[in-house]
Image (cartoon, rainbow, N blue to C red):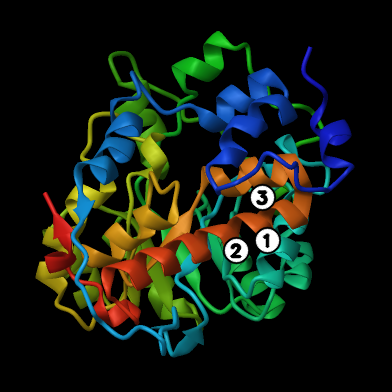
Amino acid sequence: MNATPQARSAANRIPTDIHCAQDYEARAREAIAWPSHEYIAGGSGSEATLRANLAAFAHHSILPRLLRDTTAGHTRVELLGRSLPHPVLLAPVAFQKLAHPAGEVETARGAAAMDACMVCSTLSSCSLEDVAHSAGHDKWFQLYFQPARAATLDLVRRAEAAGYTALVVTLDASIQAPSIRSLRAGFQMPPDVRPVNLAAYPVPPQVSLEPGQSIIFQGMMTEAPTWKDLAWLIEHSTLPVIVKGVLHPDDALALRALGVAAQIVSNHGGRSLDGVPASLRALPAIRAALGNSYPLLLDSGIRSGGDIFKALALGADAVLIGRLQVHALSVAGALGVAHMIKMLREELEVCMALSGCPTLADIGPEILFD
């Protein structure tokens, strides 16, 4: 029987067999209770998009150039007026107490140690205020629109007061059905793992359906945000608004025209609509539509510094790491998260040095071989 996350995480030491960032993925199978592991690792539907995310990176090879001086190289990147030491951010991942008893607070400590920007989820199992207290200067808050605008606005005001520097609005997961993998594993959310940020808000009444109406269209989707909701949010937030879940160039153009400050090309790590394109495959067309100066990030499928390099080559300014952060958290707590980020950055630096790209600006599509 697997040890509990609490027992495994208490040591907070890096196992001697961790040699690359992806090694945390295998170790997490031992560190996280099996049903919870399947909930975290699984994707929606038949997991076609989950597999496509990984395959997209494997499709590209790196084509190095010779005799280039990289001795002044660095990984600094400018995002929303801030200079970050590297382009590795932590994506919003809900319910991290499934992996470690201290949850998102422990992840924030690891991110802060590596000067990495962490994105705290609305569905965090720790309060956004507690996470902000442990995070570094650069921290963003991921927002799910709530059924009542008053609750949404209160979350925004709490994020502003806690020192978050941007809002990340996820728009590709209006319906979040449990994955088949988690159902087969018998996963049930433990009673002590809750979306604590939402505890103070009233539970909306269930939608009453008329005969012949759909539980999806006239039920669940009645709470889905619209363009009007996003425009309202931009008007009422003092923070720059970033949209996560973009896959179509026309949506990207419309979001920029509305005033969205940056966008994240993402398919929710394969956890939303199954069968959509890999985020990496969607990235070049969106970059071409938006031009080179607009801030564009990518998540979904990144497992190594080489993957980060390929994402940057195809148009991303930075990337967000999802499942890997939870794997590292489960194995070695904040130390594991910091170590995972450190290894990803060093793997990226190796790719840059050996391909002849001293800065992120030098990484372009011509450095990839298909």
Q: Disc 1 or disc 2, which is closer to the eye? A: 2
Q: Few, some or many C-alpha atoms within 10 Å of disc 1 (few <14, some 14-19, many ≥20)?
A: many
Q: Which of these two is toward me, 64 or 193?
A: 64
Q: Disc 3 or disc 2, which is closer to the eye? A: 2
Report the disc number at residue 342.
2
Residue at the image position 36 percent from the left and 64 percent from the top: 351
Precedes in sequence: disc 3 or disc 2: 3
Q: Please indicate, yes or no, whether residue 79 appears anywhere in the rendered image.
A: no
Image coordinates for residue 61, horizontal then vertical, percent: 21, 50
Label 3 secondary element: loop
Residue of label 3: 124
| Direction from residue 313 to residue 234 in the image, left or right | right
Image coordinates for residue 131, horizontal then vertical, percent: 73, 63
Residue of label 1: 338
Report the disc number at residue 53.
none
The type of residue carrying mark 2 is Lys
Residue at the image position 25 percent from the left and 51 percent from the top: 280
Q: Is residue 181 above or below residue 285?
A: above
Image coordinates for residue 148, horizontal then vertical, percent: 53, 54
Q: Few, some or many C-alpha atoms within 10 Å of disc 2 (few <14, some 14-19, many ≥20)?
A: many
